Each structure stands twice: as C-alpha cells, then as structure tokens.
Image (spheres, grey):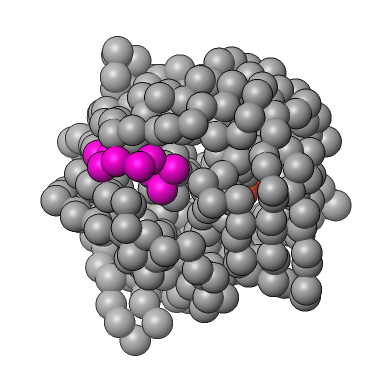
Amino acid sequence: MKRIRIEGEHKLQGTIRISGAKNSAVALVPASLLSDEIVKIDNIPNISDIDALNEILIYLGAKVTRNGEIMEIDSSSIVNKEIPEEISKKLRASYYFMSSLLGKYKHVEMYFPGGCAIGARPIDQTLKGYRALGATVIEEGNRFTIDADELKGAEVYLDMPSVGATINTILVAVKAKGETIIENAAKEPEIVNVATFLNNMGAKITGAGTSTIRITGVDYLGSCFTEVIPDRIEAGTYMIAGALVGENLRIENIIPEHVDSLINKLKEMGVSIKEERDAVTISAAEKMKGVSIKTLGYPGFPTDLQQPLTTLLTQCTGNSVLEETIYENRFQNVPHLVNMGASIDIDGKKIHIHGPRELIGCEVVATDLRAGACLVLAGLKAKGETRIDNVEHVLRGYENIIEKLTNVGAKITLEEI
Ligand code: EPU
C-alpha cells in the first residue's frame, strides 16, 4: 500500500503545469483500436489508469510505443479475444474497449468494468445504445457477450447525459451503416476530444459538445494524430490548492473556459483570480464566504471537483451547502475531513459545511480518487502532519502529484508501507 505524508501550512508559490486529461486519454486509447493504421496521441498523462489500458492493448496484440507524453498505437495485428476480468475491473474506462471491439468486429466478450466505488454506476445506457444499433447482448452475471450481424445507425435517446454512454455509442456508431443520432448526449469537453480524434481518422461526427450528436458511419478509419486536452479536474484541484494556501500560484496549460464553473464559485467566495489565455494565478484570500453548489453535467459544476472543493468550504465563513446529483456515494471523504476538524453534516444528497474550522493533521484514508485529492488538499492546509493511506487511488488520476506540489513549496512525500 502507498501512503502520502504532508506537513501542512506551507505556502505554495510558483507554477504548476497541467497534464493531459485522464478522462479524455482513457477514451482515446481504446478508441485507437478502430483505426486500421497507426495513430499517434500526444499529451498522454503518466498515470496508472493509462498503464492499465496499455496492458489491455498489449494483451490484444497491439504494438504500442510510449515516448514521454506521446503514445503510438498500431492495432493492425490485434486479435479480438475476451478481456479477462482481472484487467477490466481495474478501471471504468475498460468498457471503451468493449465498444471499440464491437464497432470494429461486431463481436465482443468482456466483463463489467471497474472504477471508483462512488455509486451504482450501471451501464444500461451503453447497452441500450448497442441494442439500438442492432447488437444482441447476453449478460451472464457480470460477463457480457455482444454480437451483431450488422451494426445499423439508429436514434438513441440517453435517459441521462452519461459521459460513458455517449462515448460508447459514438465508438459503436462510427463504422455502422447509415446515420446514428444521439439525443440527450453528454456535453463534456472530453467527448469533443474523442470525436475530433475519430474525425481525424476519417469518421463523420458532428455536434459533439452539444446534446445532439450525429454520426454517419464509414467503412475505413486511417492513421491520425491528436492531442489530449488539458485536464480540467487536475487544474481545478490545484486551483483549489491555490485558494487554500497559494501565494500567486500559477496553474498553466489550461483551457479557462473548461473550469469556468469553478472560477465563478471561487470568485463568489471572495477569492481573487488572475486569468490569462491559458493560465490562472490564485492566492489564498484573507476571508472567504460560504456558498451553495450543485453538481451537474458540463458546463455545470463537475462532480469530480465536489470532494476537492469541500476542503476549501471548511475554510469559508458561514454555512455552505453542496448537493451531489450524479453519484449516490460520493461523500466518503467527509468522515475523514471531520476527523481533521471540519464540521460537516450529511443530509441525503447534500452536505452542510459549517466554517471556518481549523484543520489538524491526522491519519486518514483515500477511499477513491477525488476523495484522495480532497485529503491531499486538507493536508496542505492542516496544522502538523497528515498521513493519507491507500493513495493508489490518487496516483490513478494525478500525474506526478508529489513532484508538482514539491516544486511549488509543499512538504509532501510518498512512501510504500
Ligand atoms: N448512469 C446510468 N446508466 C448508465 C451510465 C450512467 O445510470 O448507463 C448514471 C451513473 O450511475 C451515474 C451517472 O449516470 O449516476 C454518471 O455516469 P457516467 O456514465 O456519466 O459516468 P462515467 O462515464 O462512468 C465519467 C468520468 C467520471 C465522472 C463522470 C461525470 C471517465 C472514465 N469517468 O464517468 O470520472 O465523474 O463521467 O459524469 O470518464 C473521476 O475522474 O473521478 C470520475 C469518476
């Protein structure tokens, strides 16, 4: 098991460069299988979720070279075989392979994907998309066998704008016959990144980034190059660190529009932010006031920043209310923050945070990726030492977090226990 130790109360000064977006990269890598030629992806983050996808690529017989941030994938020699459960359960994004293989070979055998335990996370909308395009899905426990004589474009209305179901439906539709229309599609920037990647290969996708996406199937997808967009959740996490303990902390290589909802909430709290074309600079404010926040799909406030933001809300004066509308179990960070001195009540889908409260370092556990990020932020602010166990979760999604924070003045170490 891995543990992070943080000595709190050190000011963060300097620049943090944001890496490629985890939630884009984890879709682009499996999407590369749809090409019959070599594809090249730049700005790939060095995180363990990408290592897990790389393992699947190699298991299937793809030739992969990774050179720093560039990944080159040649899947011309892959074999369409069942992906074992030990690999697919490592991460949620493994199900993008299910869609790419189905789209390419019209047959796939795979197990239910893994991912952070933050709610039920069913895949019914993805399966609805497969069925609408003509596939037969056989579910035996958590094992799926999916077949289609022919994949035919269709109209797919998603019951909720799910990121995963939107990307999965695109992946199955790009080589289907005729036109697919996805209604109530998710609008996250990562979906636009995936659609651009596929269009660069020769796909015909329009409307990504809006709630109606149209895909006209093509027979052949060729070589292409694309870049992963900056990680808006990593950026948001470090922006919150800036608001907690920053002194002109500059977060660069971001698309400010992608973190607009956070910028607006920070301003509402009283944090001053200097915005540039691809960077923001943030310092901790003398005094911040509590706010109300509700998580929503993009461009609303992202659920993935809800837990990191909770740490900041413990420092605001007055009561804050945070409502989680996407996942049922995304407050597992709360008892740990309370152990550190926060005053938070859980009330169904909402939490009420009463502040400001002094945070004091103690031993806590990262129950999931963003809960871990929340506790790292708490450790940076807290008096004394914070020890966070189970930080494998954090390393799944934050590239070089120890180095990035150390470079701006944090006292943080990673150890194997
Ligand atoms: N949902 C269904 N049925 C489905 C699909 C989703 O009911 O078929 C529900 C889920 O239960 C959940 C909600 O819809 O309540 C959102 O699920 P979604 O499919 O959008 O989530 P996802 O695609 O599995 C991605 C990110 C998450 C991020 C959400 C934001 C990846 C690999 N994961 O998840 O990222 O929270 O979108 O909607 O892109 C993270 O990075 O920490 C993370 C969890």
Residue at image location 59% in from the left, 21% down from the top: 216
- Where does the C terminus fall, quadrant-wise? bottom left
Most extreme residue toward the front, as rendered?
Answer: 149
**On screen, 188 above or below 134?**
above
- Where does the N terminus fall, quadrant-wise? bottom left
Residue 288 image position (x, y, % from top left) = 53, 30
Residue at image location 56% in from the left, 44% down from the top: 103
| Foreground of the two, 308 or 163 | 163
Specify start and end residues of the magenta stretch as a single range.
Answer: 32-40
Residue 370 image position (x, y, % from top left) = 52, 54
| Foreground of the two, 252 or 181 | 181
Residue at image location 25% in from the left, 68% down from the top: 413
Q: Is residue 35 magenta?
A: yes
Q: Is residue 155 left or right of residue 340?
A: right
**On screen, 102 above or below 79?**
above
Residue 151 image position (x, y, % from top left) = 67, 39
Residue 131 image position (x, y, % from top left) = 78, 45
Residue at image location 77% in from the left, 26% down from the top: 155
| Residue 167 visible, this angle | no
**On screen, 235 above or below 382?**
above
